[in-house]
Image (cartoon, helix red, strand yellow):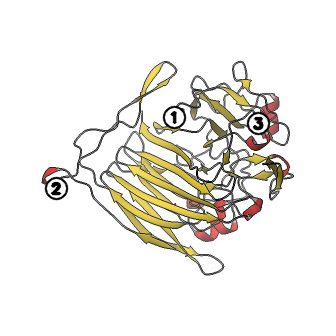
């Protein structure tokens, strides 16, 4: 299902101008510009739509491509809200695709691996698939051993979202909406979720999450894109990563948080300074052994300070840089440990271990079972509202 509308905003003489927001974030003692744009710059943006395929019940699925005049394109399907490609230039101006994905809907249906998908109702793992709320213990689908992972057997990554496209000055916008009914995958309440993808003229992809409910429930939404800034050429171990986090939430052998907030210093999880992903990934450290690499939630500094810098990834060969900003208190860094070469993606590339990495903005895993963690409870009359920004540039 889909509908569309468009608009343009203008100033005097009918010329579109940019409305500017300025601000600064602090990263390691250095000021980081926040969503700054040039004044009075005219932008050219567009959205195209084409049929992507049909589901087993005959539902048409579409693919939307958002473009700007800086050479960036983002393709998103309303099946699972998945980002299927992000095309950005390297330092030489050559454009390449920096996310893992498939070329056809049939492959997304056959090999669901959360590639680029929206995740909900509750991202990450819930121990034993249960959580307490208002004196009731809710049993959810158990789809990751004994645990509940990324919304269950039919999470938000496997549903059809309603799509609405918009064009504003300097921005192309895709808004996706979905009603998750009371009891779906075991969750209480009718939850209305809206996720808005906005591509700006300065190569920022904004993902804005909103949700309301008619009954107390839990919600924790994110996007599960696998990035390879070298365009899937080899693995991601030479990427350099920096995280705005002094602590992380260690896990047990089932990758469930223990409840501890552990200091990253003097551990292989210290990315407070830029470090290649592969530099310490094979160290004999319990957390790396449990996960087969990195698959950990990092506790972001200034976790209640609104939108702020969370991460910076750099790929030396291409010169591409990706920075992540978020309003969420946590960031899951996952190094693609469970990719095993059993699936092939775009251009026939085989996705082996560490073919891509994820930076998932989120509340903490298993939060409903840890009262000391940031709450993920949503009540009627309140609105869940989070924002993630992925900014791309070159060195």
Residue 46 spot, x, y in % from top left: 34, 60
| Res 371 label | 3
- Pointer 3 or 1: first along the chain: 1
Residue 90 spot, x, y in % from top left: 42, 42
Residue holding disc 2: 14
Relative placement, left or right, of 310 versus 16 is: right
Q: Is residue 192 above or below residue 29?
A: below
Residue holding disc 1: 306
Mark 2 secondary-structure assignment: helix
Mark 1 secondary-structure assignment: loop
The quadrant holding residue 138 is bottom right
How packed mark 3 is, by other alpha carbons closer than 10 Å (few <14, some 14-19, many 20 or more), is few
- Pointer 1 or 2: first along the chain: 2
Q: Does the residue at mark 3 contact the one at mark 2 (Cβ under 8 Å)?
A: no
Residue 110: in sight, yes or no? yes
Question: Which of the two discs, 1 and 2, sits closer to the camera?
Answer: 1
In which quadrant will I find the C terminus?
top left
Q: CA distance from mark 3 to mark 1?
A: 22 Å
Q: CA distance from mark 1 to mark 2?
A: 35 Å
Mark 3 secondary-structure assignment: loop
- Pointer 3 or 2: first along the chain: 2
Residue located at (42% from left, 37% from top): 394
Residue 150 spot, x, y in % from top left: 71, 53
Residue located at (36% from left, 43% from top): 202
For this orientation, the residue located farthest to the bottom is 58
Residue located at (40% from left, 69% from top): 4
Residue 280: in sight, yes or no? no
Relative placement, left or right, of 136 versus 161 is: right
Tally of numbered discs: 3
Residue located at (14% from left, 50% from top): 12
Q: Nearer the viewer, residue 186 or 253?
A: 186
Question: Which of the two discs, 3 and 2, sits closer to the camera?
Answer: 3
């Amino acid at each position: 299902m889909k509908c569309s509308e468009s608009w343009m905003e203008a100033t005097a003489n009918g010329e579109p101008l940019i409305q500017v927001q300025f601000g600064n974030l602090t990263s390691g003692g250095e000021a980081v510009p926040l969503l700054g744009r040039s004044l009075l710059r005219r932008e050219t943006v567009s959205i195209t739509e084409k049929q992507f395929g049909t589901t087993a019940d005959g539902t048409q699925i579409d693919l939307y491509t958002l473009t700007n005049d800086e050479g960036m394109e983002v393709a998103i399907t309303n099946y699972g809200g998945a980002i299927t490609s992000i095309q950005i230039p390297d330092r030489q101006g050559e454009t390449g695709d920096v996310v893992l994905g498939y070329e056809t809907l049939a492959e997304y249906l056959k090999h669901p691996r959360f590639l680029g998908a929206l995740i909900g109702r509750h991202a990450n793992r819930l121990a034993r698939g249960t959580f307490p709320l208002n004196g009731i213990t809710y049993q959810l689908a158990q789809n990751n051993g004994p645990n509940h992972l990324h919304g269950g057997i039919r999470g938000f990554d496997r549903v059809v979202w309603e799509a609405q496209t918009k064009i504003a000055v300097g921005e192309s916008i895709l808004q996706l909406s979905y009603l998750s009914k009371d009891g779906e995958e075991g969750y209480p309440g009718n939850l209305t979720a809206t996720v808005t993808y906005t591509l700006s003229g300065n190569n920022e992809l904004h993902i804005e999450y909103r949700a309301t409910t008619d009954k107390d429930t839990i919600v924790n939404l994110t996007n599960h894109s696998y990035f390879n800034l070298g365009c899937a050429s080899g693995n991601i171990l030479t990427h350099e990563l920096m995280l705005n986090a002094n602590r992380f939430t260690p896990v047990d052998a089932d990758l469930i948080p223990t409840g501890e907030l552990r200091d990253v210093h003097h551990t292989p999880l210290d990315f407070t300074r830029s470090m290649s992903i592969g530099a310490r990934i094979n160290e004999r450290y319990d957390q790396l052994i449990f996960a087969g690499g990195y698959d950990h939630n990092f506790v972001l500094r200034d976790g209640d300070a609104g939108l702020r810098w969370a991460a910076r990834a750099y790929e030396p060969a291409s010169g591409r840089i990706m920075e992540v900003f978020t309003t969420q208190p946590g960031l899951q860094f996952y190094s693609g440990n469970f990719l095993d070469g059993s699936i092939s993606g775009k251009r026939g590339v085989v996705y082996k271990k560490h073919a891509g990495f994820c930076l998932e903005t989120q509340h903490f895993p298993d939060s409903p079972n840890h009262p000391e963690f940031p709450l993920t409870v949503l009540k009627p009359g309140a609105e869940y509202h989070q924002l993630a920004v992925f900014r791309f540039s070159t060195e």
